[in-house]
Image: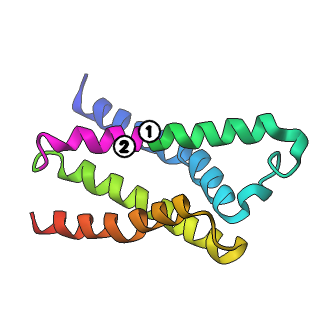
Amino acid sequence: MPDGAAGRERTVFRLAVFVLAFVPVSAGLAGTLLGAGLPGLEAAAEAANLDSHIRYLSGLLLGIGLGFWSTVMRPAIRLDRFRLLAVIVIAGGAARLLSLLLAGWPDAPHVAALAMELVVTPALLAWSMRL
């Protein structure tokens, strides 16, 4: 493939990723701002929608944890991945903090998760910056 065609393909790929990323960004923003008031989640009759959403978010959490594990054996090489995952966790913690401010204090496990997201993870991120 000629260099010009390869460059155009990279540009099209980057544009596609940029455009398609609006789906998770807008869904994440809507979920962050609306919480359980997200359309389809507000009624008890919509239990299947709530279950689906919780399972999806739990799958993301599982993926983030596996991603962190993938950085353990060669942290110097995988530092960018670690930092990206940390920023994702901190963004989730910021959304959880917004829930605390708007909806009130959650149960203890959620408060512990908030501490991991907004205290422990930023500390690890700062530590990684010294490496």
Between 77 and 20, the one nearer to me in the picture: 77
In the image, farthest residue toward the front: 108
Q: What amino acid is found at the position of numbered circle 1 in the picture?
A: Leu
Q: Residue at x 32, y 66 (%)?
A: 120
User: In the drawing, does residue 89 fall left or right of residue 38?
Assistant: left
In this view, 68 is above or below 32: above
Instruction: Please tell me whether the stretch drawn in magenta is mainly helix, strand or loop.
Output: helix
Farthest top residue in view: 1
Magenta residue check for 34: no
Report which residue position mark 1 lands on. Answer: 62
Q: Amino acid at mark 2?
A: Gly
Q: Which residues are magenta?
A: 62-75
**Of 100 and 25, which appears nearest the observer?**
100
Residue 23, given in percent of the width and then of the height, sits at 61, 45
In terms of image quadrants, where is residue 66? top left
Residue 53 horizontal/vertical position (percent): 67, 41
Instruction: Answer with left or right where residue 120 lies relative to residue 38.
Output: left
Can you name the residue that lies furthest to the bottom here?
Answer: 101
Describe the element under mark 2 as helix, strand or loop: helix
* Neighbourhood count class around disc 1 (C-alpha, 10 Å): few under 14, some 14–19, many 20 upward: few
Instruction: Give the color scheme: rainbow, by chain, secondary structure or one colour.
Output: rainbow
Residue that label 2 marks: 65
Q: Which part of the image, by quadrant, shows the C terminus? A: bottom left
Figure quadrant of the N terminus: top left
Q: Residue at x 32, y 30 (%)?
A: 5
